[in-house]
Image (spheres, rainbow, N blue to C red):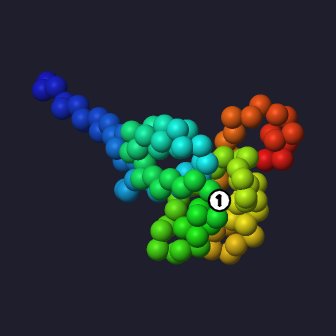
């Protein structure tokens, strides 16, 4: 008897699970050195990064529908409009409310954690 040919296993390639385009991250951080370091880390991970130093700049970018931001990464404590204030505006705006937001802080205060 002739041996039957074995069907070839078709493995799943991990590339199928990657997004078709790089994600656009809006980084909001008032500290220059932190902003540069986090931007570099994100770009090294193939994210497209727009980095700004305050929440008002971030808000202008978010409401401009041409930007198509996929994720906001924002410092909690900033002068002027805080990260929490920005989060509140995002959550109440029809075109932005489904944009994921990650809050970050160098402060270890439990009060800040609970506000987020």
The residue at which mark 1 appears reads as 55
Residue sitting nearer the eye, 113 or 53: 53
Is residue 25 in view?
no
Q: Position of residue 31 (x, y in %)?
A: 59, 43
In the picture, the quarter occupied by the N terminus is: top left
Quarter-of-image position of residue 106? top right
Identified at 52% across, 62% down, the residue is 69
Q: Residue furthest left?
A: 2
Q: Is residue 39 left or right of residue 101?
A: left
Q: Is residue 54 left or right of residue 41?
A: right
The local secondary structure at tag 1 comes to helix
Q: Is residue 14 above or below residue 1?
A: below
Identified at 74% across, 34% down, the residue is 107
Say how many tags the image has. 1
Q: Residues within 10 Å of mark 1 (few under 14, many from 20)?
A: many
Is residue 28 in view?
yes
Identified at 62% across, 56% down, the residue is 54
Q: Position of residue 63 (x, y in %)?
A: 59, 73
Identified at 81% across, 41% down, the residue is 112
Q: Position of residue 111 (x, y in %)?
A: 87, 39
């Amino acid at each position: 008897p002739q041996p039957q040919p074995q069907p070839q296993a078709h493995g799943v390639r991990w590339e199928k699970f990657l997004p078709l385009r790089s994600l656009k991250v809006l980084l909001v951080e008032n500290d220059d050195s932190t902003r540069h370091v986090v931007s570099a880390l994100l770009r090294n991970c193939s994210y497209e990064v727009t980095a700004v130093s305050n929440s008002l700049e971030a808000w202008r970018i978010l409401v401009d529908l041409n930007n198509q931001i996929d994720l906001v990464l924002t410092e909690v404590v900033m002068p002027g409009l805080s990260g929490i204030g920005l989060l509140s505006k995002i959550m109440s705006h029809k075109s932005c409310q489904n944009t994921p937001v990650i809050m970050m802080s160098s402060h270890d205060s439990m009060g800040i954690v609970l506000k987020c």
